[in-house]
Structure formats: C-alpha cells, structure tokens
Amino acid sequence: MPLTDKAAATVNEQITDAVTQSNVKVVAESPAVALSNVYQTAAHSTGIMFENAVNSQNQQNVVTQAATTQGISQIYSLDTIADAVSMAKILNP
C-alpha cells in the first residue's frame, strides 16, 4: 500500500510523545550525571593523593632507617677501632 503525501507526513502522537519524553529525560538527567562525574573525579584524585602520601611516608621511613643503621654502625666501628688501636699499643710496645 503506497502512502500518500499526507499520510507520510503524519506521525502518530504516541511516537512524538515518547520521543519528547525521552528527550526531556535526557536533558533533565544531564546536570546530575555531570555532577556525579565531577564527584567521582574528585574522589579518584583524592585517593591518588593519599596513595602518594603513604608512598612518600614509606620512602621516608626507609631513608630514616638506613640513616639510623649507618649512624649506629659508625658509632660501633669507632669504639672497635679505638679498642683495636689500644690493644695494638699494648701488644706491640
């Protein structure tokens, strides 16, 4: 059945209402979706910031432990060298 020009130009009102409602729904949800994207990005950035802070603390703890170990090692080695020199003087007059 070929459609006449009038029938081809006419659209069912239910279809136009459905399309209009779906367009209104999309437009109405846009601010909420945009704001939720902003919140999600902010939360992700904050999480990365805390991860970097924890990593920095861990690295600082490693440096502190290494410095403490090196310092204690030097303290102990000074006494050992002094003892060794004293013993050498005693044994080799």
Image: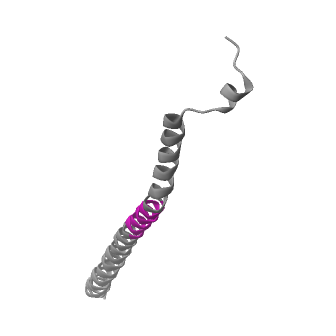
- Residue sitting at 72 percent across and 22 percent down? 4
Could you tell me which quadrant the N terminus lies in?
top right
Q: How many marks?
A: 0
**Place of residue 3 in the rendered image (x, y in percent of width and height, measured from the top left):** 69, 19
Question: In the image, is residue 6 above or below residue 52?
Answer: above
**Place of residue 37 in the rendered image (x, y in percent of width and height, measured from the top left):** 46, 60
- Residue sitting at 47 percent across and 46 percent down? 21
Could you tell me which quadrant the C terminus lies in?
bottom left
Relative to residue 19, is residue 85 drawn left or right?
left
**Place of residue 58 in the rendered image (x, y in percent of width and height, measured from the top left):** 34, 69
Residue 86 placement: quadrant: bottom left
Relative to residue 67, is residue 38 drawn left or right?
right
The residue nearer to you, when weighing 65 against 12, is 12
The residue nearer to you, when weighing 43 against 86, is 43
Relative to residue 64, is residue 4 drawn left or right?
right
**In this view, which residue lies farthest toward the top?**
1
Question: In the image, is residue 67 above or below residue 62?
Answer: below
Question: In the image, is residue 77 above or below residue 51?
Answer: below
Q: Is residue 80 magenta?
A: no
Q: Main secondary structure of the magenta part?
A: helix
The residue nearer to you, when weighing 3 against 86, is 3
What residue span does the magenta drawing correspond to? 34-49
Q: Is residue 46 magenta?
A: yes
